[in-house]
Image (cartoon, rainbow, N blue to C red):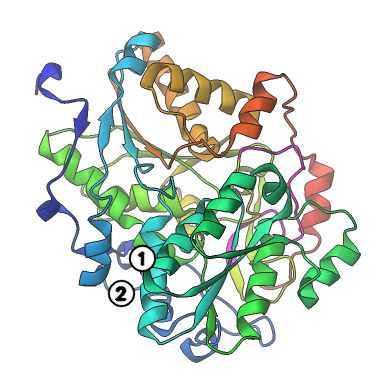
């Protein structure tokens, strides 16, 4: 199809929205390893997991066989408030780069929470309400997940308790206030409100926190309050399932114009955005129907895929959660305080870890100054201030487009723009003032963290 016939923004009609989530595990030959009970070393049962998570979410977490899982009508009705989201042709960026590459991005920032996280937040809140719970607890790093969950809980009139990584709590007060506006309570983590928080503060005096710390506190808060369950914004199988709406819409929009991508790029922290974006494309790849290059982009300061170990590890710093087999830096790993680009989790989704281990996708890591250079470049070309997290994908997409300029190859590049960066201006300020530093952990530091991995398998 001629280039001029493809609009800047490709929208689907409401009746073209997905009616079912896609479960990529159904097409995986090597399924993700099961979650293990740290006390027994045996796979977690549905009954054990139901003490922490909502019952129907547990069923989704353990479902390795059903390719499609219907989206309840109430969730689909909520999705209609901001979905389908646009697939945008980055004509201005292409022109600025003088590249023969065609660049598309799926923009997930067109809702008040500012990111893709709402896709799973509303689903998890729905199942909590359906179960008759009083409220939920969670952690948040940069604040996008906490913001999305506070919105979803307000919609279903659920209490929402958020433990926010302390460095983000201090750097992003406006994100915190949005959560409070929607009725959530927000506590900097590690706090002195939980036993595990007090223990972490004693072990690491003055720590700025990590997602692993915040997860530990949120799980303790949920399991010690009647009528509460814990919910998570990334990493888990159920979250990648909900986020598959991103990839399903992206593929439907591309198919509408006969576009077949060569490279699909997503930022990678815990895996929610990347896993959602690539899901239907990965399904085709797993079934042998079509091949794509799929690239995960992570921060050099928290490089779980590119420098981590594929092993069972605790999902949290306090070691109260189940063990997951994943690429990990060790549950005790805490990113440097100067790390401002998000994607702070010590491990990677078990689904994505297995796919990466089996060679179905690539991974690269990039330093944060290069990430913010790409973010600024993109903002000046495309008119959207991108979130630092998705700017990792922008960096990689620009690099791929520049390679095409050198080789003359006309690749089609698709990347995920997870959301906007309007609550991340402290990080942008540091970049503009020349105060942003690139920190890359040494091999010695990582080996020290790996030493704490549980000796399983």
SS label for mark 1:
helix
Task: Identify the residue shown where x is 76% and y is 62%.
Answer: 190
Q: Is residue 343 magenta?
A: no
Q: Which residue is mark 1?
A: 25
Looking at the picture, tell me which residue is in the foreground, 150 or 294.
150
Across and down, in percent, residue 152 comes to 41, 64
| Residue 148 spot, x, y in % from top left | 45, 57
Q: Determine the residue positioned at 80% across, 51% down.
A: 447
Query: Which residue is depicted at the point 33% across and 53% down?
Result: 279
Which label's residue is closer to the chain start, 2 or 1?
1
Can you identify the residue that label 2 sits on? Answer: 65
Q: From the viewer's perspective, is residue 427 above or below residue 115? A: above
Pinpoint residue 22: horizontal percent, then vertical percent. 27, 62
The C terminus appears in which quarter of the rendering? bottom right
Q: Is residue 120 left or right of residue 176?
A: left
User: Label 1 near label 2: C-beta < 8 Å?
Assistant: yes
Q: Main SS of the magenta segment?
A: loop
- In the foreground, 175 or 22: 175
For disc 1, the neighbor class at 10 Å (few under 14, some 14 to 19, many from 20) is many
Picture layout, residue 177 above or below residue 457: above
- Determine whether 185 is above or below 276 in the image: below
Please identify the quadrant where the N terminus is shown.
Answer: top left
Q: Secondary structure at mark 2?
A: loop
Residue 339 visible within the image: yes
**Vertical relation: 436 (above or below) 156:** above
Q: CA distance from mark 2 to mark 1?
A: 7 Å
Residue furthest to the front: 181
- Find the magenta span and give its range: 325-341
Crowd around label 2: few <14 · some 14–19 · many ≥20 (10 Å): few
């Amino acid at each position: 199809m001629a280039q001029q016939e493809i609009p800047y923004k490709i929208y689907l009609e409401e009746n073209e929205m997905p009616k079912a989530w896609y479960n990529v595990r159904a097409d995986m030959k090597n399924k993700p390893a099961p979650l293990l009970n740290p006390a027994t070393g045996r796979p977690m049962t549905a009954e054990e997991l139901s003490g922490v998570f909502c019952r129907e979410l547990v069923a989704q977490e353990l479902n390795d066989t059903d390719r499609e899982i219907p989206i309840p009508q109430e969730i689909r009705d909520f999705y209609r408030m901001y979905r389908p989201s646009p697939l945008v042709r980055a004509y201005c960026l292409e022109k600025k780069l003088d590249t023969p590459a065609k660049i598309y991005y799926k923009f997930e920032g067109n809702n008040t929470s500012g990111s893709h996280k709402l896709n799973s937040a509303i689903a998890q809140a729905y199942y909590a309400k359906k179960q008759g719970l009083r409220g939920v607890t969670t952690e948040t790093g940069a604040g996008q997940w906490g913001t999305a969950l506070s919105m979803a809980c307000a919609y279903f009139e659920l209490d929402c308790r958020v433990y926010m990584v302390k460095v983000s709590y201090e750097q992003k007060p406006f994100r915190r206030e949005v959560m409070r506006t929607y009725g959530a309570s927000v506590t900097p983590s590690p706090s002195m409100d939980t036993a595990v928080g007090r223990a972490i503060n004693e072990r690491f005096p003055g720590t700025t926190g990590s997602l692993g710390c915040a997860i530990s506190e949120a799980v303790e808060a949920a399991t010690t309050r009647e009528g509460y369950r814990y919910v998570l914004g990334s990493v888990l199988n159920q979250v990648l399932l909900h986020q598959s709406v991103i990839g399903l819409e992206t593929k439907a929009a591309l198919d509408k114009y006969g576009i077949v991508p060569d490279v699909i790029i997503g930022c990678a922290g815990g895996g929610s955005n990347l896993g959602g974006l690539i899901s239907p494309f990965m399904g085709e790849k797993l079934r042998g129907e079509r091949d794509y290059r799929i690239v995960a982009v992570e921060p050099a300061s928290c490089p779980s895929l590119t420098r981590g170990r594929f092993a069972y590890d605790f999902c949290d710093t306090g070691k109260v959660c189940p063990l997951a087999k994943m690429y990990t830096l060790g549950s005790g790993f805490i990113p440097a305080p100067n790390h401002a680009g998000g994607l702070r989790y010590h491990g990677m989704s078990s689904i994505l870890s297995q796919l990466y281990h089996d060679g179905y996708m690539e991974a690269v890591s990039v330093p944060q100054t290069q990430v913010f250079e790409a973010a600024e470049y993109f903002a000046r070309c495309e008119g959207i201030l991108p979130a630092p997290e998705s700017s990792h994908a922008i960096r990689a997409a620009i690099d791929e487009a520049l390679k095409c300029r050198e080789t003359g190859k006309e690749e089609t590049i698709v990347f995920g723009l997870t959301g906007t960066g309007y609550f991340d201006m402290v990080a942008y300020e540091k970049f503009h003032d020349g105060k942003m530093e690139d920190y890359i952990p040494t091999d010695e530091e990582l080996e020290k963290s790996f030493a704490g991995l549980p000796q399983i398998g």
